[in-house]
Image (tube, helix red, strand yellow):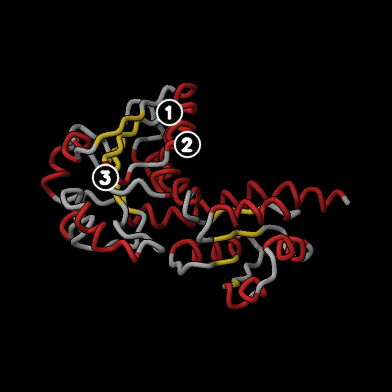
């Protein structure tokens, strides 16, 4: 597990998941690797492939994850980068699957906030399973065009409807679930003042929740900046599904690991 960024849920869930499945997880920060002293990603990938069965990489740059995967001979899991956060979305979809008794079709999820890496993966995930999604983002913080185009392509096959607006109230009205994330992600700290100003009005509070369906629930990938993107009353209230969502990171990580490692285990037994 190579981590360039701090982590609570991703690191803990992967480490516990691997241990529960009977394996061993090795945590490495960039301070523990020669990457921090100039060794190339390609050389690191080649060496680690001789030691381990899989690598999960939490990186600042998506291009670095792609480079590691290019040169590694073992599976590489994207544990978050500046473009996507796919493992989080597997847990999110599991949480919604549980709440909606296994059905995505006919439900609508609303995103309130930044068009960031979490929204990118959420768009792709929702489109893949046929879940309608409405994203409310400020004009200057919309998701990347290439991600939207890829999601729209998936949606044409699944029947999902993807919509975009800059009006949080319009997006929240009649939604089956509301989802938000921090306004200032890791790496965006230099833009903090600008972002805090841009996202005023994009907070999930009791008033916004009241616009959604009576049985709607609220998601947040955590950590939360209470009082900014979400209020205490919502996060600690009966509508919050965030603690189930956080727990589901563990179950999602186990599923991902089993999916990629079982074929390798069978191959070794065959030898």
Q: Which residue is mark 1?
A: 130
Tag 1 or tag 2, which sits nearer the N-term?
1
Looking at the rendered image, the quarter that the N terminus falls into is bottom right
**Residue 171 percent location from the top left of the image:** 22, 35
Residue occupying the point 26% across, 45% down: 112
Query: How far is disc 3 from disc 1 in space, using C-alphas?
Result: 20 Å
Tag 3 or tag 2, which sits nearer the N-term?
3
Checking the image for residue 24, the label placed there is: none
Residue 227: quadrant of the picture: bottom left
**Residue 50 percent location from the top left of the image:** 79, 63
Q: Which residue is mark 3?
A: 112
- Residue at the farthest right position: 271
Q: Which residue is mark 2?
A: 146
Query: How far is disc 2 from disc 1 in space, using C-alphas?
Result: 19 Å
Q: Is residue 40 above or below residue 62?
A: below
Residue occupying the point 21% across, 59% down: 228
């Amino acid at each position: 597990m190579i981590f360039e960024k701090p982590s609570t849920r991703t690191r803990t869930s992967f480490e516990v998941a691997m241990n529960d499945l009977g394996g061993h997880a090795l945590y490495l920060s960039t301070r523990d690797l020669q990457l921090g002293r100039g060794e190339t990603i390609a050389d690191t990938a080649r060496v680690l492939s001789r030691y381990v069965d899989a690598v999960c990489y939490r990186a600042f740059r998506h291009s670095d994850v792609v480079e590691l995967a290019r040169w590694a001979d073992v599976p590489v899991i994207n544990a978050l980068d500046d473009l996507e956060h796919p493992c989080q979305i597997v847990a999110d979809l599991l949480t919604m699957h549980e709440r909606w008794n296994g059905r995505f079709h006919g439900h609508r999820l609303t995103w309130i906030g930044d068009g960031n890496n979490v929204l990118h993966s959420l768009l792709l995930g929702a489109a893949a399973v046929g879940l309608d999604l409405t994203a409310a983002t400020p004009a200057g913080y919309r998701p990347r065009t290439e991600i939207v185009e890829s999601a729209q392509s998936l949606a044409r096959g699944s029947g999902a409807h993807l919509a975009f607006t800059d009006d949080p109230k319009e997006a929240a009205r009649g939604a089956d679930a509301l989802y938000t994330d921090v306004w200032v992600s890791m790496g965006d700290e230099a833009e903090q003042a600008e972002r805090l100003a841009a996202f005023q009005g994009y907070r999930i509070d009791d008033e916004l929740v009241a616009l959604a369906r009576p049985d709607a629930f609220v998601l947040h990938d955590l950590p939360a900046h209470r009082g900014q993107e979400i209020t205490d009353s919502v996060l600690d209230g009966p509508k919050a599904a965030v603690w189930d969502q956080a727990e589901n990171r563990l179950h999602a990580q186990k599923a991902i690991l089993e999916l990629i490692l079982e074929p390798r285990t069978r191959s070794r037994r065959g030898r």
